[in-house]
Image (spheres, rainbow, N blue to C red):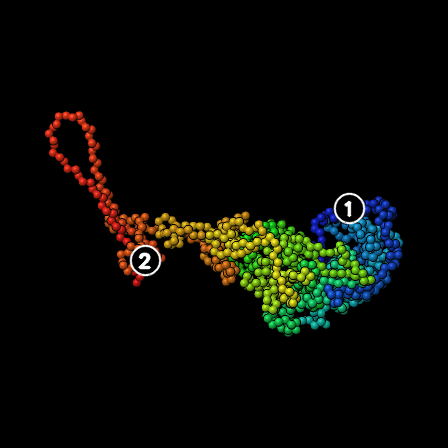
Amino acid sequence: MQTSLSRRQRHRRTGAARRGRGGGSARRAALAIPILLFGSFLALGGAALVGVVSAYAYYSRDLLDPAKAFADLGFDQPSIIYDRTGTVELARLGERKRELATFDQIPPELLDATTAVEDKDFWSNPGFDLGGSLAATLDTVQGKPRGGSTITQQLVRARLLPEKAFEGEIWERKIREIIQSIRLTQAFPGEEGKEKILTAYLNQNFFGNQSYGIVAAAKGYFNKQLKDLTLAEVAILAAIPQSPTQFDLVKNAARECAIDLAPDQECPVANVQLVVPQDSEIVRRRNKVLDLMETRSVLSGANHTLAEYELAKTDEVVLAPQGSTPWKAAQFVWQVRHQLGVILCGEESADVCEKVDTGGYRITTSLDWSMQQVVEKWLYAAARAPNLANTADILDQLGIPAADQKWILALKKRNIHNAAAAIVDYRTGQVLAYAGSAAYYAAGSVTFQPQYDVLSDGFRQPGSAIKPINYITGIDDRTMNAASMFMDVVTDFGGAKPYTPTQADSLERGPVRLRSALQFSLNTPSIKAGLINGLDHLFQRMKDFGLRLPTGAIPVTSMSIGTIEVHPIDMVSAYGAIANGGVLMPREMILSVRNAAGEVIYPTGADTPVGTRVASAQASYIITDILAGNTIRSVNPYWAKWQIIEDDKRRPAAYKTGTTSDNKDVLADGYLAPPDDPNAPALVAGVWMGNSDATPNTGSLSLDSSAPLWSRILTEVSQGLPMAEFKQPDRIVTADVDAFSGLLPGPYTVKTVKEIFIEGTVPSRTDDLHVELDIDEATGLLWQDGCTGPMVKQGFLDFSVVEPRFPAWQAFTQDWAARAATGPGTAGGPEKTKTSFFYNNSFAPYGKTWGGTFAPTDVCTPVAPPICDPGTFFDPFATVDPFATVDPFATFDPFAPPLPTPCIEPTPEPTPEPTLPPEPTPEPTLPPEPAPAPSKTPKPRVAPRRPRLRPARIPTPG
């Protein structure tokens, strides 16, 4: 949800790094307890309320004499704001002449409206409201701070306390304020005294729009005398003093045309009128005042019916034409005014600090007027000109080159009506250019509210521009590095209902390393990185980088792709911190302040800006090195289209874009390499484009809107500056890794890349994105015994072990892998997205592959034994000599299929040798007998020779 004009934020701060964090409850208690005790002491004193405790005398000892201070109230000497050279006047504060009104000149309705909303018991209280103070104090303790000061207390705080009274703790100032209020009431007793106090209050109050005093406010807003104000007008004037900067009617007004126009026609200046929307916060507060007046109008109630009060709520708030000298860099001036208020009166009273406009100060700011003019020119060209009929003529008048007119003209009909941009010196925090809308003094509309400061008051989704903070968190924590692999696969990240974010092009790229995921702004890897970081941890790191988040914001899974709203100016400073080696500098808009006597009152030694380290120099450099690839065509030809060029040479720069999923906001943030001269500006710039009412554009992404706007602003303001390179810090090492798994190259790595790491974070594991399998070389199928062969070992992609900390993601990875095995362009998964080689099937710096090939799913079929001739049999282990060819003209082909195993004749079994009987044991010699006839000894059988195998015939090529 976007913050509209009607939800303007009150507190405008110049930088989160200036303020401490935490301890809010303790500080509230430290303020509340003393006030409760003091209030109790006063209550013990009964009606006198004076001299109850010794604390009264102690805290009143240095207070001014209320009667004399009241009589000496002085007014007006305008303060002047200059650019950084001190020669260009940007604005005069308090330029309107104050006219003092007497009590009888103030309409009773205006008096009643003021007391009804600010101090209902004004006419009877002793200068402070014990019950109101105690109730406000208890609310403060409970973390719901609200005002509890009476009209008398407000007058005292603004004009009747010495400088010394503002020293020390806030609760001490509160006690002095109460005491002085009591003393003032005593000095001016009775009804006549109350009239003087109320008149002085209305004469000194700041009503916004450079108006001090009720007379100036009536003339400035409505061009009327007090006596001519309507019931609705007195009510809205009475509603302003609670927060004059927030409720400034001119700032809240929309510039509307009093005549009907064609959609692309510019309203004539004479027909522009300022109208405060009925749903704005100040109009709602006016209606609350009217409600209170129905029962609290002690002076005028008898003159009006309840119906009149109700009817006044419907009155349209139309302001008089504003005739003061236009401010230069008006939204910057408003920021300076607030910062000056902090310097002079403290944060609590910054927006109601009268000294700002009446003290005659001379303020030298950080603004570079030449850069400011460049920013304002390009904002008007990109956001306003396309919505006007004579766009080409306007661009010519602005001096926009013909090449750039093409992308600007392409924004016609894209429903983008507003833009904002800032440039900051990231080494000092000085704001060099600042424009919170595309044209502060132009006629407005629902989609274009020119005086609303989107940079500091608006909450906008950063989209993918938040991703560098996400990844730098993991790199600094050493839970990931620039080579860490993420599966870019549409995944259901759970929650109350399925959450399956996709890429704008509906493609899934499979395994990608962190470097590529950030450069090409892939969503799924960023969400996975956020979950690895831990949502609570990442949420805190975002705040560490100075991002102020909406009240009630909580960590959510989608915040890793920029769904939590931030102030765009805080994004500029956060990128500046990365550029500055991880040191976040507080934003500075005021360089010096001199009082009316010419004395320097700011800065003092205590005002030297001090940066806060939010990331290591090494992690910051790695992110910078990655984002710098977005300006190098060979690395990222899509984003590098908007590189910074001077004299046909690329200026080293790093940037990132952001587009919200509903196209409501498009951003670009980035920076140039720091110059070698430490006194030269190191530039970071950020731009936002969209509509004031948060309606989405019609299909424009950051690469055709905010990216070229960012590029052209930085290109022009950097002309003539020395070229510089990003400096690598120590403890950065380089290593070769697998281009897909990001691990050390393995035996099946198909492509390697060089990557940089923080020392000690180089991967120690070898590529495990492959599995080795036995394959039948003849068929390319999975091996089993009996296949044609030979069996070989090959490596194939295997995603079964990726992202082991999150097993729920594995099912989506396997579904993608099954589709990817069939090739790119295969749709499926939760959102019917398509498989794609990185980046989009056409730009594939590491080859059209996902890191290898997918394993076959089929198993080879064993070869059936051949049918052999009678008398032969198949011998699978027999070998054939391929060179033993029968054909003398045959040639050996080493690449031919393997020869079939031959059929062979069986080897005859050899005839066993006959076993001779053992020689008989000689008998004792007997008388000789007649000799028998001799028998023949058989010859032993010789085994036949093994027949020679006939070689297979090798066919002769024909």
Q: Earlier in the sequence, mark 1 or mark 2?
A: 1
From the image, which quarter does the N terminus lie in? Answer: bottom right
Q: Is residue 192 left or right of residue 229?
A: right
Disc 1 target residue: 33
- Circle 1 crowding by C-alpha within 10 Å: few under 14, some 14–19, many from 20: some
- Circle 2 crowding by C-alpha within 10 Å: few under 14, some 14–19, many from 20: some
Instruction: Specify the amino acid type for callout 1.
Output: Ile
Disc 2 target residue: 892
Instruction: Specify the amino acid type for callout 2.
Output: Phe
Could you tell me which secondary element the residue under label 1 belongs to? helix
Q: Is residue 338 left or right of residue 494?
A: right
Quarter of the image for residue 45 reads top right
What percent of the width, then of the height, locates residue 517?
55, 57
What percent of the width, then of the height, locates residue 454?
68, 61
Quarter of the image for residue 222 reads bottom right
Q: Residue at x 83, y 51 (%)?
A: 176
Reply above or below: 291 against 907: below
Residue 256 visible in the current orientation: no
Reply above or below: 557 against 396: above
Could you tell me which secondary element the residue under label 2 belongs to? loop
Residue 76 visible in the current orientation: yes
Whether residues under marks 1 and 2 lie with C-beta atoms below 8 angstroms apart, the answer is no
Residues 360 and 601: in front is: 601
Quarter of the image for residue 207 reads bottom right
What percent of the width, then of the height, locates residue 101?
84, 63
Q: CA distance from mark 1 to mark 2?
A: 103 Å
Q: Residue at x 45, y 55 (%)?
A: 853
What percent of the width, then of the height, locates residue 220?
78, 66
